[in-house]
Amino acid sequence: MAVRYPAMTQVAKKRLVVVSNRLPVALDKNQSGLLEVKQGTGGLVTALEPIVRKSNGIWIGWPGCMVTPDVKEALTKFTLETPHTLIPIDISEEEVQQYYRGYSNKTIWPLFHDLLGQFSFDLENYDAYQKVNHRFASVVAQSSMPDDACWIHDYQLIFAGQYLRELSYHGHLDYFLHIPFPSLDLFRRLPRYEEIMHAFLAYDHIGFQTSADRRNFIGCVKWMVPKARVTSRKRQATVQYEGRDVIVGYYPISIDFEEFSRGADSSDANDAAWFLRENLTIKHLALGLDRLDYTKGIRERFLAFERLLVKHPELVGDISLLQIVIPSRLNVPEYQELKRELDFEAGRINSTFSQHGWVPILYEFRTLNREQLLGHYKAADIALITPIRDGMNLVSKEFCASCTDEDGVLILSRFAGASAQLGKNALLVNPFDYDEIADAIYRACTMSADEKQNRMRTLRSEIRRNNVHRWVRWFFKEESPDVQVGPVIEQNTTDGKTGKL
Ligand code: GDG
């Protein structure tokens, strides 16, 4: 008979132990050379930080640097001022190279984003990945109690659950994958895939971003683990494996809608938006905002924007693409190469089309502070979000939440997880189809105010309802989503036809 670990309900009543590659903080030296700990940014932090605090919980992760005595001291001091505890994991420079830049980012990341061309495998990196996962598991085992709710996150820590089991951890283990899960045909290219699959099945509850990811995973289980018995219900599948039940569901991550909406109406955000538009003489501002990553389709977006200028010359001088690229993984050669490509394409397009007082692509390689981020969302008429593949894409949701005047248009890739939820009222595009993107931008520029408002109002109410707080409750089975969010939805394609994914 299948063993059932204690069911994870009422998460608020349990102490939450969140485990992720990075701690939710950033460490920086101030002007006097003293280490300062600041709240980190990004979706995971925004989503989980308040919940970990509320449960007096623990967050276990790598601080992004060696755990020296002054790092420990700074983290302890920070922890004393907050109700939750941060526990740093020490990872050597060589391990960062192999576990993080190597196996996590050269093997799993490209494969899971369907990009076989970027994918490579190295046994030493795989060994280091397992070793570091084991270290995470040991720290979790030492720091948590069986009654805690232990929630492990993302592709860097697939093996942590299995090692916890080997360390005789009997508590309930939850896992959430933030990136897509590939099809069987791709997953089977991963050397030693049986070991990875076995590691996944050590968890009690696995969450994916979309129903397509869950379906891919279940397809792999059926093919690779013939001994497993799978029963599927509407939103959830159960895998019976080695005498245990593993629940497999999908829970599209979201954002704190109210915080973005309120923030976008603040005077700071409005000033930042005004400042941004003040010196631009254009009618339409399209915004791209992405981490430097080849999955985000930034180069393809530049080429699609170039196509727009050729196809619709009446927009020359009237529209610019403001592309913010946030520096990321700069120690990985592929990312350095991508940066060079982007610099080249932006330069080439600008030198071809620029006119006195107008530049087609405003390209900035930097991080924005919160007010600037909100100001950029607020100032933009169009969000051009065209990843080649993306687990969810929070920027698309943040843009809509910040669009309090309901006058913005969201252009979204069909291959972003968010398209399953937002596809009806966004203009959906294929990131490789430059003509389709060009036409969608043209359509956004010529759309009536009424249509913009209807679309944006519906997008905002969808995100308001299914916000990040609901995502957490939904993951822990305390609440259901407000609507059916699966990939089989009616979608308005950019030419107005209706199609099914
Ligand atoms: C992974 C998956 C999935 C970005 N630049 C600045 C800034 N950001 C914040 C955004 C947003 C977050 O970072 C980026 O989230 P995304 O979802 O767009 O992308 P990934 O970083 O690739 O995240 C993704 C996500 O996990 C969550 O599950 O959606 O598919 O790849 O929140 O606002 N924030 C500030 N300044 C910046 O310059 N303050």
Image (tube, rainbow, N blue to C red):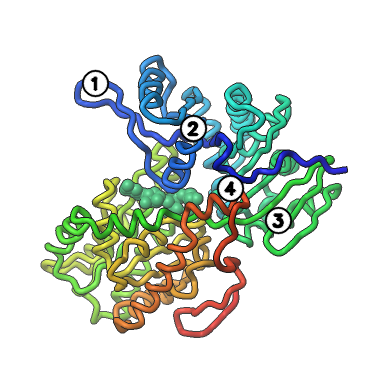
Residue at 66% across / 54% down in the picture? Answer: 249
For the residues carrying marks 4 and 3, which lies nearer the camera in this image?
4
Lower position in the chain sequence, tag 2 or tag 1 = 1
Q: Residues within 10 Å of mark 2 (few under 14, many from 20)?
A: some
Lower position in the chain sequence, tag 2 or tag 3 = 2
At which x and y percent is residue 72? 41, 19
Q: Is residue 466 above or below residue 443?
A: above
Three-letter code, disc 2: Asn
Residue at 49% across / 61% down in the picture? Answer: 466
Three-letter code, disc 4: Leu
The label shown at residue 231 is none
- Nearest the camera: 266 or 305? 266
Lower position in the chain sequence, tag 4 or tag 3 = 4
For the residues carrying marks 2 and 4, which lies nearer the camera in this image?
2
Lower position in the chain sequence, tag 2 or tag 4 = 2
Q: Is residue 188 above or below residue 18?
A: below
The label shown at residue 56 is 2
Q: Which residue is mark 3?
A: 184
At which x and y percent is residue 203? 69, 40
Q: Which residue is mark 1?
A: 33
For the residues carrying marks 3 and 1, which lies nearer the camera in this image?
1
Q: Identify the image quadrant of residue 75.
A: top left
Ligand 1 within 8 Å of disc 1? The answer is no
Q: Is residue 57 above or below residue 371?
A: above
At which x and y percent is residue 272? 19, 55
